[in-house]
Image (cartoon, helix red, strand yellow):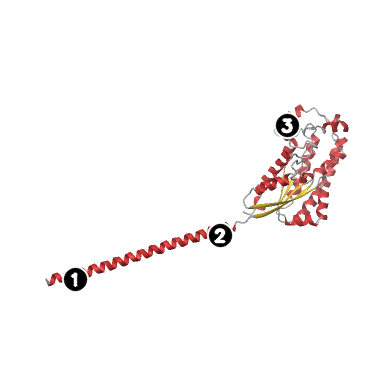
């Protein structure tokens, strides 16, 4: 009986110890689980805060685009009166995320390269805006070239034109170099995008090679000047704007064209350009020279393409 009592006491003690150990182990694991849960919750809060912090850091970029140049920058021929490519490129850029775009249009119809430079040097307002610009876009050279054609119109099929263009090209080369250097002096970092010129007479006189030959020569001159300026880029619109809807079928246009400039006097030439319908679908029927809305849309698409190729120079991501 005494032995049985002793065994019962031993079992009671063993049971108590077992319960004590098990209870402590259970409590320890419960606390550990709570600790891990708290840690996970804490880490989750931290991660959420980090993501929220990153989201807050993405601020809207203020982009100022300043346009300098002649009538193509002014937007002559744009029936919407939105400033041609300047208004259209603003719409395209604004569609990009986290970008607010301001444009300033300093285009003036009729300006040659030297006159654009003179306006820039004479206006503190333009200078200040150029200094603050994130992007600079320019049209230049068209009126310089047209001046040569006007002076040498009677020699368009003569070797005298070649000499006149060669001489005028050197003058233009110096002027466009000075203009680009002055712009870069006012703003050392903003990318500069410079448009080519085009031949507005091509669809009327596709067989007259002088027009296209010297247009391409003019563009080569501008392109060389642009290449000498750091972070400056050439935007070529010549072929499409010159040939219009005949871009991929110029041979057909040449075969069907019966206009010969050598048989035209000034009166007949004026009659050709007095047609109310423009033969080039990218040019205005009002003057057969400047882009219409379709032309400006094409100019905008080309500018946008080149800008995206160099996006790191102006778009902070």
Residue furthest front in the image = 80
Is 289 situated above or below 6?
Answer: above
Q: Secondary structure at mark 2?
A: helix
Give neighbour class at mark 3: few <14, some 14-19, many 20+ (Cα, 10 Å): some
Q: Secondary structure at mark 1?
A: helix
**N-term-proximal mark, 3 vs 1:** 1
Residue linked to disc 3: 250
Spatial CA distance of label 3 from label 1 is: 114 Å
Residue linked to disc 2: 53
Q: Nearer the viewer, mark 3 or mark 1?
A: 1
**N-term-proximal mark, 1 vs 2:** 1
**N-term-proximal mark, 2 vs 3:** 2
Quarter of the image that includes the N terminus: bottom left
Badge 1 vs badge 2, beta-carbon distance below 8 Å: no
In x, y percent, where is residue 146? Answer: 83, 41
Spatial CA distance of label 1 from label 2 is: 65 Å
Q: Secondary structure at mark 3?
A: helix
Residue linked to disc 1: 9
Badge 2 vs badge 3, beta-carbon distance below 8 Å: no
Q: Is residue 142 visible?
A: yes
Q: Which mark is residue 169?
A: none
Is 264 situated above or below 291?
Answer: above
């Amino acid at each position: 009986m005494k032995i049985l009592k002793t065994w019962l006491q031993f079992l009671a003690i063993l049971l108590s110890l077992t319960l004590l150990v098990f209870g402590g182990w259970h409590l320890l694991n419960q606390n550990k689980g709570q600790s891990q849960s708290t840690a996970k919750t804490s880490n989750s809060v931290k991660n959420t805060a980090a993501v929220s912090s990153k989201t807050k850091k993405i601020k809207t970029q203020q982009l100022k685009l300043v346009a300098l140049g002649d009538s193509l920058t002014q937007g002559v021929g744009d029936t919407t009166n939105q400033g041609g490519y300047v208004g259209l490129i603003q719409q395209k850029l604004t569609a990009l995320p986290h970008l607010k775009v301001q444009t300033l249009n300093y285009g003036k119809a009729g300006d040659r390269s030297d006159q654009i430079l003179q306006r820039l040097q004479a206006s503190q307002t333009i200078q200040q805006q150029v200094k603050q610009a994130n992007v600079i876009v320019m049209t230049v050279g068209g009126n310089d070239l047209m001046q040569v054609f006007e002076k040498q119109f009677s020699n368009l099929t003569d070797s005298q034109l070649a000499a006149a263009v060669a001489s005028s090209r050197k003058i233009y080369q110096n002027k466009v170099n000075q203009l680009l250097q002055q712009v870069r002096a006012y703003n050392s970092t903003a990318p500069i995008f410079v448009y080519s010129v085009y031949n507005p007479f091509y669809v009327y006189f596709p067989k007259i090679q002088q027009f296209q030959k010297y247009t391409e020569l003019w563009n080569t001159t501008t392109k060389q000047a642009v290449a000498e300026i750091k972070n400056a880029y050439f935007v070529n619109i010549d072929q499409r704007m010159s040939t219009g809807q005949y871009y991929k079928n110029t041979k057909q246009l040449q075969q069907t064209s019966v206009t010969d400039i050598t048989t035209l006097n000034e009166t007949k030439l004026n009659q050709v350009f007095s047609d109310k319908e423009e033969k080039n679908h990218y040019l205005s029927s009002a003057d057969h020279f400047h882009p219409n809305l379709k032309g400006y849309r094409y100019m905008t698409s080309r500018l946008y393409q080149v800008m995206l190729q160099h996006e790191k120079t102006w778009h902070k991501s």
